[in-house]
Amino acid sequence: MSVIKRVVTLLRGSVREIGESVVDANATRIYEQEIVDAKHSIETARGDLTLVMAKEMQSAREIERLKQEVGRYETLAVEALDKAHEQLAEEVAGKVGALEHELAEQTRAHAAYAVQVVKLKDLVRTAEQRIREHEREIAIAKTTESVYRATRSISENLGHGGSNLLNARQSLERIKRRHEELADRMTAADHLDAEFGDTALERKLRDAGIGDGADRQRAAMARIRARQQASAVPPATE
């Protein structure tokens, strides 16, 4: 029972109090260690609970045994009376009385064990629930702490003109401008080649109907016209 009290004392208080120390790494570690210690205490409490439950079961068996003994001795007392052994029946009645007294004591003990088992189970369940709540809050606190550190780091880096983060961004901008300049130069070269280079000359010759391309075009057109004229001639009649 004292172990359960220590567990409850350890976990007493609002779970939300963990959030107050979210930026304190030492406090977070302390809470984590307290949770570990509380878990060990609950394991010990579970062991104590099993002992109480075992006592409850033992007392239940003893109650059944005593009831059987009371019944057996009462039967023997009746037989003694039937055979006119009054004094023997009195002795057996005394035995029955002693057994009934022991039975009453065992019944009270069994009831006390049963009450203790119910209370201990409730305390263990409550302690386990509180631990789960603390573990959730610890996880939230650690995550929030990491976010705070990252945000602070970014703010500090951006707050200095010569920071690594700002320098890296400026380098990326310079690389982007160089790529754009290179693309513009390549486009301009293509335009110049189309206007003054061999490509421009070939285009002018093709437009004037001079060269292999023009000859192939005229030959293809002549074949097309011949086929058209052949299909237009009507068939001869006899």
Image: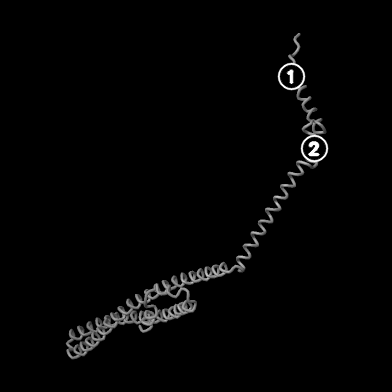
Residue beneath disc 2? 202
Q: Residue at x 76, y 41 (%)?
A: 195
Residue 155 percent location from the top left of the image: 54, 68
- Is 106 positioned to the left or the right of 128 in the image? left
- Is 137 positioned to the left or the right of 79 in the image? right
Q: Residue at x 41, y 71 (%)?
A: 133
Identify the amino acid type marked 1.
Answer: Ser
Whichever of callouts 1 and 2 sits on the residue coming sooner in the sequence is: 2
- Is 89 positioned to the left or the right of 141 in the image? left
- Residue 83 falls in image quadrant: bottom left
- Residue 156 falls in image quadrant: bottom right
Residue beneath disc 1? 231
- Asked if 13 appears above or below 231 in the picture, the reply is below
Say which of 163 and 58 sits in front: 163
Residue 92 percent location from the top left of the image: 22, 88
Indicate which label's residue lies in the foreground, 1 or 2: 2
Give how far apart the Cα atoms at labels 1 and 2 are: 36 Å
Task: For mark 2, give the secondary structure.
Answer: helix
- Is 83 positioned to the left or the right of 183 in the image? left
Disc assigned to residue 52: none
- Looking at the image, which residue sits at the far top? 238
Quadrant, the C terminus: top right
Quadrant, the N terminus: bottom left
> Badge 1, how many Cα within 10 Å: few under 14, some, many 20+?
few
- Residue 206 falls in image quadrant: top right
Task: For mark 1, give the secondary structure.
Answer: helix
Say which of 89 and 96 sits in front: 96
Identify the amino acid type marked 2.
Answer: Glu
Residue 159 percent location from the top left of the image: 56, 68
